[in-house]
Image (cartoon, rainbow, N blue to C red):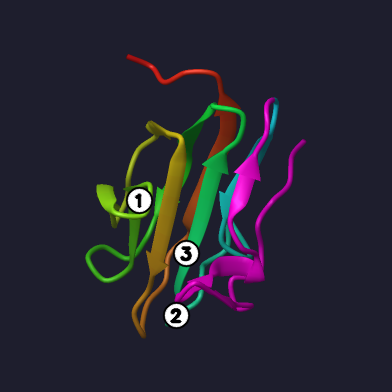
Amino acid sequence: MYFMLFDISLFSQHADRLFCNGIGPHVLDPGDVFGVTHPGYPGPYTNNVDCYIQITASNDGSIRLTLVDFFLENRYDNLIIYRGNQLSIAHLTGQVYPNYIESSDILLHFKTDVSDTRRGFFFQAEWITELCK
C-alpha cells in the first residue's frame, strides 16, 4: 500500500491538535509503506503552517521513518519529531541529509513562519517488525 499525504491547507481539529491534510492519526499495518510530505512537493510549502502528522504501528510493530529529502528555511521553519506524544527526538530545520528514525509511535510537528519558503520534506514511513539495535 502506498499513498501520499497532501493539502496541508486543510486542517481538522482532534484532541487540541490541527492535523496536516485534514487527516487524523495514521495507523500502519504489516506491509504498509507510504510517503509523508507537504502539498506540492517538490514545490515549496506555504507560510503560516502549524500542524501535526501522527503515525502509529499496529500489531506490536514499529515504524521506520526514513528521510528522503528535506530543505526548510533555516531557523524559521521547523519540523519537530516526537517519539510518542512527548519525547522530542529531532528538531529539523535548514537542509538535512538522509537518515531514519524508528519508534512504535511518531508525531511530526510542522511549523512555518510568515515569509520565505523552500522545497520542503519527504519521508518514507514503513511498518517494521522490530527496532534496530
Labels 2 and 1: the sequence-earlier one: 2
Q: Position of residue 30 (x, y in %)?
A: 68, 26
SS majority, magenta: loop
Tell me if residue 75 comes above or below residue 128 in the rendering.
below
Write down the region rendered in magenta: 1-30
**Residue 3 falls within the magenta-colored stretch:** yes
Q: CA distance from mark 2 to mark 1?
A: 20 Å
Q: Which quadrant: the N terminus?
A: top right
In this figure, what is the number of numbered marks?
3
Name the mark on residue 81.
Answer: 1
**Dot in front, 3 or 2:** 3
Assess whether residue 62 is covered by the magenta stretch: no
Residue located beneath label 3 in the image: 52
Left or right: where 28 falls relative to 89: right
Say which of 20 and 61 sits in front.
61
Q: Which residue is mark 2?
A: 47
Dot 2 amino acid type = Asn
**Label 1 secondary element:** strand
